[in-house]
Image (cartoon, coloured by chain):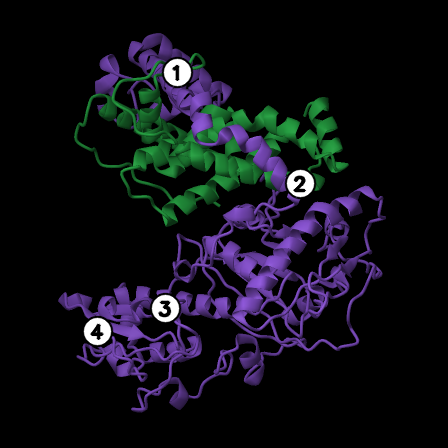
Chain colours: A green, B purple
Amino acid sequence: MTTDDQNLINRCRAGETAAFGILVDRYQNRLLRTLVPLVGSVHDALDAAQDAFVLAYQKLDSFRGDSAFYSWLFRIAYNASMTARRKRRHFPKHSLDQRQDDSGFEPVDGRAPEGPAESMMSEERRQTVRTALAELNEEFRDPLVLRELEGLSYEEIADILGCPLGTIRSRIHRGRMELKAKLLRMMNDEQPEPAPLRTGTACG
Amino acid sequence: MNGPHSNDQNLPADGPRSLPNGSELLSAYYDGALTAEERAQVDRALAEDGGIRERLAEFSELSGLIRGAGAVSEEELRRAGGSVLRDKILAQVSAGTASGARKRAFSLSRWAIAAGALAATILVVGLLTVPRAQTVALNSTFEAAPGGAIVPDTLLRETSAEFPAGSRTSSAAESVRAKEQKDAALLNRNGTAGEKARSSGTPVGAGVVRMATSVAADPAAPAVRAMSGGALETLPSFAPGKEVDSGELISHLTSVEGEAVLVQYTVVDVRRARGEMEVLLTRHGIRTLPPVEAAETKSRDMSKDEVEPQTVAIYVEASGDQLMAALDEFKTVPTSVEAIDPKGMVKKGDGANKLSGRGQSDYEVPSPSKAMPAAAGQPAPMPGFSPERPAGTPVPSVAPAPAPASPVPAPAPVAPAALASDAPAPLVDSVANSPAGPARMRGAVGDRNERQMSYQIPLELSQKEAEQLWREVPKQQQTAPTKMNQRYGEYVNQRRSFDAKDKLEAVPGPSRVLILLQEGPAPAAEKN
């Protein structure tokens, strides 16, 4: 953990909430980058991030600094993302606004907007990949996203997900294979749906 | 991810022949997660096989796509309200609550949904007789007993909190007003009192538990009596397999007019459940004290990197409605209800009535004749289950089907013989057409003959009553993988959530409540 983070945390502990604002500014984008593919929408990712930051603030006293602040925060956020996903399952949205609900965007015409400078992907493609990720079984999606977007080691992922190392290795691989198949199908326009991969059981 | 590689999806799952264990090895190679020996093996394969190199390049391409999917543009963030995320978070932490407007109304139906592999047990401990003399203890101190390993210091530190007074109300209007007051009190406490305590240099440490009352929002309202916290180090052991002695636990909880609550879940994955529970509690503005992990752990296998807790105890301060809203979102459902007196004895009779506010005891073990009034040909009044129906309103009859919305107040709980056979009406019914449909379980028997014969287990039956009915079902049907088994399990869960809601409603707030998460197998339909 950086000294700067530790200083900010100390200030938070002393009751200076503005210091926590600096931590939020510092890590919210990084957190959202992972949460969006995990929960499938910017709205839900923001909800999860909000919950995570607030919970982290409340638990700051229990943060011992053994790990980086962000790693600690991310574990809280991952739990929050699971809550967000479950909420979506319990309250599925069926409407013409589905696309908006999923992406946080108003539906737009088919023309790809000008790509933002920070991304080489068009918005359309970004949504396609998010959709494909959302369709993945979470047993495959979660380790894959944690690996690709958080850069976590297999050991760290196994720890977070409560799975054996070998299971993580297998699931990341299968996640890649299934995601690739879905993307190919989506990009090549509606080929027949192959049989889904057999899903495993929850770890832990 | 297009064009040249599009036919690769048809490759065998284990990848190129030249690479044992195939793509999985390659995938781990890409992630740098192989042993030196495995890495050398893949290196050799890469040098020999262009197809493998191509597949490796695909992983890189895939990585780019996934990372791109995570990128959130400024415009996207703005549209989703992300530009004010920081402000919202700071407002929440300043106010000391995460609930605010996001607090949702209790949705009973969702309590009844058994979700996933997790099963839950909720244990509501109530009706404890607390001597009047044992009232509020300010800055009470206890001697830390040796060997109090179950409660770490962190718990003792964090119990230095102030308890705002709440009010116990009876009418709905008063309840709403009281809730608003409680919420305001919570906001105030969490936002200011906690920080004051933290910044004022209040001495904290092992052995000191400071519980106090604050100024009541309604001076006329009776103050919630906060227990002194008792001797936290004497918490009963959460050792695996040992039943929690609720009589001991209760001394650490807030007791208001002799009531205290312990919510117990049996979950498959304690760690994950704990994380999710914390998120939910935060979301609903419920202050939590640090979880207490059981001294006994799941595994002593030192070859594993870690030992996981088998039981986690989370102390919370909340009102019943807050708890209901939060637990409503938890992915497990409650599965049992008990009332236990301070000596750990099961309460029966009038005590239960007092807690539930209903005209029947949830705790009394029914006699066979009481358990199955329909079997004896006697109609029985049924308390309501549907949240839309006021408590005490007779439930319209559901049999025979299709039952019109006639307010016949004497439905017939299913008889054992009907459960066990393909007996026709009056047990045949259509729940969907029943005005009491949401309140009832429907099962189906006769799958073997493709005959869908519906039956019901009315929820006004206690668990014991239903179990008694269940025992009458032939053994082969109990063990057969039929819908009947599944329905019975659902009934039990639904019944328990019903009872749990009943008990949680009686919790005045803010009260100190203990939530226990215990590891255990996900039970199937319980039979005994």
Q: Which of the two marks, 4 or 1, is nearer to us in this view?
A: 4
Residue type at mark 3? Tyr
Which residue is drawn at the image coordinates 65% and 67% (left, top)?
B167
| Labels 4 and 3: the sequence-earlier one | 4
Q: Position of residue B29 (x, y in %)?
A: 43, 20
Crowding at mark 3 (Cα within 10 Å: few <14, some 14-19, many 20+) = many
Crowding at mark 4 (Cα within 10 Å: few <14, some 14-19, many 20+) = many
What numbered label is drawn on residue B429? 4
Quadrant of the rendering where the C terminus of chain B is positioned: bottom left
Asked whether disc 3 touches disc 2, contact meaning CB atoms under 8 Å apart, the reply is no
Residue type at mark 4? Asp
Q: Quadrant of residue B454?
A: bottom left
The residue indicated by pointer 2 is: B94
Please state if A181 lies on the left or on the right of B121 as rendered: left
Crowding at mark 1 (Cα within 10 Å: few <14, some 14-19, many 20+) = few
What numbered label is drawn on residue B491? 3
Asked whether disc 4 touches disc 1, contact meaning CB atoms under 8 Å apart, the reply is no
Q: Is residue A68 visible?
A: no
Structural distance between the alpha carbons of marks 3 and 2? 43 Å
